[in-house]
Amino acid sequence: MDPEVNLPAAAFRRDDETPDEQFYRQPRFVTHIDAGAIAAVTGLYRDYLPAGGRILDLMSSWVSHLPPEVEYSEVVGVGLNRAELENNPRLTSHTVQNLNAVPGLPFADHSYDAAGITVSIDYLTDPVAVLRDLGRVLVSGGPVVISFSNRCFPTKAVAIWHTLDDEGHLQLVQHYLEAAGNWTDIELLDRSLRSGRGGLIGDPLFAVVGRATGEARN
């Protein structure tokens, strides 16, 4: 674990430490958040991902939740299940990679304009290493949109995620980006659908957005 995170190694242990490839071997052609939360993710991508840009979809699956009316020059998925990635209609190409085993990304410096990580950040056992290398891969000023809800595969989420509430999750992901050292302009967002009285409707949806500084950090 990167010492800059200032968290014990136990914080990133999981109840199920079997290889991730084994857990994700069976394709899951389902969505992991409800329609309102999915719409919130799509809205975030509409707001932050540049039309016509080169987009990196990290921890991708069979759906990317990108706005259907927006065209991108390239959408590359990185995920664990080949069948899911092959059935994602928005991907122009894909790479099968376990980011917990190999956090470095197989892409050149500044080769993408923006990235998304949808409801998956809680599964990374070395999130700082992944986000630091992502900062290398994005152009200067390129955004990453990291969204999450209150659902997960509990045995695969890291221990610290289970100990925190929604506000704590926002602060933790902010801390990951700060520890990575090559992100700036970090925003913490609550895009949950609420009634006129402020009550939550369906699954909540939160996001942390940062912009790459363009630096490669070790």
Image: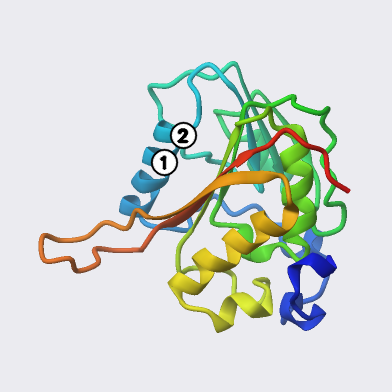
| Left or right: 75, with 126 as reference point | left
Query: Measured from the top left, where is residue 55 in percent x and y?
Result: 61, 29
Q: Residue 136's mark?
A: none
- In the picture, the quarter occupied by the N terminus is bottom right
Q: How many marks?
A: 2
Residues at circles 2 and 1 in contact by the CB criterion of under 8 Å: yes
On the image, the x and y values in percent for residue 57 come to: 62, 38
In screen coordinates, is 69 left or right of 193?
right
Quarter assignment of residue 61: top right
Q: Quadrant of residue 176?
A: bottom right
Label 1 amino acid? Leu
Question: Can see residue 123?
Answer: yes
- Dot 2 alpha-carbon crowd within 10 angstroms: few under 14, some 14 to 19, many 20 or more: some
How would you rate the neighbour count of disc 1 (Cα within 10 Å): few for under 14, some for 14-19, many for 20 or more?
Answer: many
- Residue highlighted by disc 1: 44
Residue 73, image x and y in percent? 59, 16
> Which residue appears at 81% of the width and 46% of the height?
97
Find numbered disc 1 in the image and state the secondary structure of the residue it sits on.
helix
Q: Horizontally, is 99 left or right of 166 in the view? A: right
Residue 206 lies left or right of residue 94; in this view the side is left
Q: Residue at x 68, y 74 (%)?
A: 158
Q: Is 183 or 32 nearer to us in this picture?
A: 183
Marker disc for residue 48: 2
Q: Secondary structure at mark 2?
A: helix
Amino acid type, residue under disc 2 in the picture: Tyr
Real-space Cα distance between discs 2 and 1?
6 Å
Across and down, in percent, residue 13 comes to 76, 78
Q: Quadrant of residue 206?
A: bottom left
Q: Residue at x 84, y 69 (%)?
A: 3
Above/below status of 63 relative to 193? above
